[in-house]
Image (cartoon, rainbow, N blue to C red):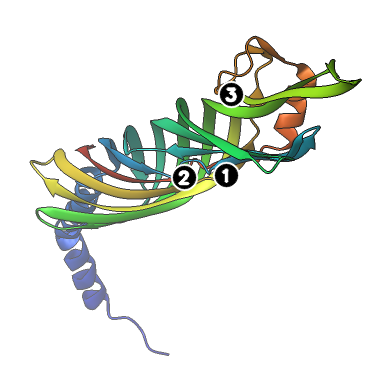
Amino acid sequence: MYKFHPDLYVFMKRLAFKNLGAVTAMALALATSSFAQSETRPKYEFRLTLGLSLPGGASSSEYRDAWTEDLLSSVVDQGTITPASPAAFSCQGFAAYFLTENLGIQAGLGIYSESISNTSDFALSYSWTSGASGSKTQTWTGTGRLKSIPLSLNALYEWRGPAWSFYVSAGPTLFFNSYEAQSMSGFGVSDSSRVRVYVPPNWVETIFQSVDALPVPLAVPTQSWVGFGFDIGAGADFRIDEKWAITADLRYFGCPARDFGWTWTVGTYSGIMGNLAGWPFTAANAAYAAEHTTPSTVGASSLRIALGVKLVL
């Protein structure tokens, strides 16, 4: 059996103890260097941006009714409410925590308020049994507002360079929305009376009839709802110093649309043609008109372009 030479054993033992300090120092240096890199690497990012949002807006609503009565052989009253939404300002904040050098999780909270202009175009056309006919058109303007607060939880990936960095992020989003709108529309009505007049040598029953359209206010009362959707975005950062950067963000928010019906307002109105004054618009009329009015489809989705600042910790 091979035996370990005593002098060789002593030599190796001395060599190990002699270099233990150097090996330990080297290991501590590596550990310290690794720890320092881990500590100095950015772990947290905070972004605050202001921008313009191109809104999803709301769809048009239509009212249409056709009827006949006494001397009126045909009456058609129809209206269209068309919403228009300009670009609106929005504010968005993000906080991110990096799990690795490039991959992190990101929470976002924003606020968006969209002003809506509603244009209502109404037309009344009618024909008499005598063959005569006529028409009347009217246009009104109304307002509306859509508010949305998106709350996002995203996956974030970032490519870092000496001066520039680029990122993409996406994830599920909860939308806390509210919507309201006001407008006008016409509602066709007719008034007829039967009287007996003497036409020698007999008494003859004659019908006197007027046709008009009532200008009735419409509204979508304030409605609040929570929608579940997503957001996806990309951007770039230009570093100012070790902690601060200027950031640009392009982001799409996708939220399912929702339908809202119009409420016709009960009241007393005078016709737009001046033929009828103080005419009652009853609850039965309002219910009938609402049934013949298509709902407005409101979308809280939007495309947002924003600039802001980023803080790295």
How much space separates mark 1 and mark 2, taking CA atoms? 8 Å
Q: Which mark is residue 257?
A: 1
Position of 262 with respect to 155 (left or right) is: right
Q: CA distance from mark 1 to mark 3?
A: 19 Å
| Of the pair 179 and 33, the residue shown nearer to us | 179
Q: Residue furthest bottom?
A: 1
Residue 33 pos. (x, y %):
18, 52
Helix, strand, or loop for circle 2? loop
**Image quadrant assignment for residue 189:** top right
Q: Are marks 1 and 2 in contact (CB under 8 Å)?
A: yes
Q: Earlier in the sequence, mark 3 or mark 2?
A: 3
Residue 298: x and y, percent? 54, 40
Q: Which of 222 and 148 lies nearest the eye of the viewer?
A: 222
SS type, badge 1: loop
Q: Which residue is mark 3?
A: 219
- Three-letter amino acid code of the residue under disc 3: Ala
Examine the rendered structure and indicate whether residue 267 appears above or below residue 305. above
Asked if residue 119 lies left or right of residue 156, the reply is right
Residue at x 45%, y 45% (from the top left corner): 56
Q: Quadrant of the N terminus?
A: bottom left
Above or below — where is 230 with respect to 309?
below
Question: 10 Å neighbourhood of mark 3: few (<14), some, or many (≥20)?
Answer: some
Q: Which amino acid does the dot numbered 2 rest on? A: Ser
What whole-number distance in Å separates the C-alpha atoms at marks 3 and 2? 22 Å
Q: Nearer the viewer, mark 3 or mark 2?
A: 3
What residue is shown with label 2?
A: 301
Identify the residue at image location x=22%, y=71%: 12
Foreground label between 1 and 3? 3
Q: Is residue 123 visible?
A: no
For mark 3, give the secondary structure. strand
Task: Inspect the image, locate mark 1, and give the three-letter code of the amino acid beneath it.
Answer: Ala
